[in-house]
Image (cartoon, rainbow, N blue to C red):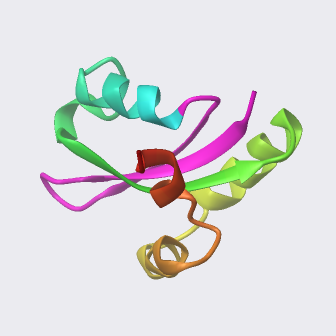
Amino acid sequence: MGWYVYIIQSEKDGVFYKGSSSDPLRRLEEHNAGMSHYTSGRMPWVLVYVEELPSKKEMLIRERKLKRGNSAYFSQLILSDKNILKTLTSD
C-alpha cells in the first residue's frame, strides 16, 4: 500500500485543497461526489499534484507542511519531479 499526499484545485475558483490518502484517484472521486463537507461547495476539483511517501507517519508530516504552503509554492510543486501524477493516470 502506498501513502500519498495530494493537491486538488477547484475549477470553480482556483482554490487549492491539500490532503492525504492511500488512493488519491478514489479520493478525488469522493471530493467531486460531494462526500467532503469542506470541498463540496467548490466542485468540480482537478487532481494537480501527487507525491508518494514511504510511511503513513511521513505522509501525515508532509500533509501538515503542505497545508502551510501558498499558491506560488503549489505552482512549483505541480511542475516538479516530485509530482507523480502522470505515472498514476497513464495507462
Q: Is residue 61 visible?
A: yes
Residues shaded magenta = 1-23
- The residue located at (16%, 58%) in the rendering is 13
Please state the total of marks drawn on the protein image: 0
Q: Answer whether residue 9 is magenta in the image.
A: yes
Q: Is residue 37 visible?
A: no
Kindly indicate the quadrant of the structure image that contains residue 42. top left
Q: State the image coordinates of residue 69 (x, y, percent, origin top left).
A: 57, 68
Say whether residue 56 is left or right of residue 90: right
Say whether residue 61 is left or right of residue 17: right
- The residue located at (37%, 34%) in the rendering is 28
Say whether residue 20 is left or right of residue 89: right
Question: Relative to the observer, which residue lies in front, 90 or 17?
Answer: 90
Kindly indicate the quadrant of the structure image that contains residue 35. top left
Q: Is residue 44 above or below residue 77?
A: above
Q: Is residue 24 above or below residue 81?
A: above
Question: Relative to the observer, which residue lies in front, 85 or 46?
Answer: 85
Q: Is residue 33 above or below residue 15?
A: above
- The residue located at (18%, 38%) in the rendering is 43
Q: State the image coordinates of residue 54 (x, y, percent, origin top left).
A: 85, 45
Q: Main secondary structure of the magenta part?
A: strand
